[in-house]
């Protein structure tokens, strides 16, 4: 799925604005796999963004 489609799905499903969804998309792309080891790092990145 390309970035624009993913962002539009995030906006639709989360009811957040485009800027917030861009931040979510970027954090998830930077961290790759969401697992126990990355959980805390992903939380910190979400808080920063």
Image: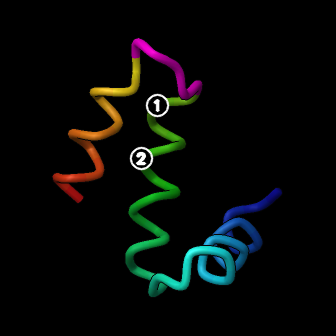
| Residue 31 marker | 1
Query: Badge 1, how many Cα within 10 Å: few under 14, some, many 20+?
Result: some
Give the answer, above or below, for where 13 lies relative to 25.
Answer: below
**Separation of disc 2 and disc 1 at Cα?**
6 Å
Highlighted magenta segment, given as a residue range: 33-37
Q: Position of residue 8 (x, y in %)?
A: 69, 79
Q: Main secondary structure of the magenta part?
A: loop
Name the residue: 45% across, 16% down.
Answer: 36
Q: Position of residue 9 (x, y in %)?
A: 72, 74
Q: Position of residue 29 (x, y in %)?
A: 53, 42
SS class, disc 2: helix
Task: Tell me which corner region of the image, top left, top right, bottom left or bottom right, holds residue 19.
Answer: bottom left
Q: Please indicate whether residue 48 sits to the left or right of residue 17 in the image.
A: left
Instruction: Point out the residue furthest to the right here.
Output: 1
SS class, disc 1: helix
Is residue 34 part of the magenta span, yes or no?
A: yes
């Amino acid at each position: 799925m390309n970035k624009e489609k993913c962002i539009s799905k995030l906006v639709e499903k989360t009811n957040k604005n485009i800027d917030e969804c861009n931040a979510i998309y970027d954090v998830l792309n930077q961290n790759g796999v969401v697992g126990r080891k990355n959980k805390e790092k992903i939380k910190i990145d979400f808080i920063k963004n």
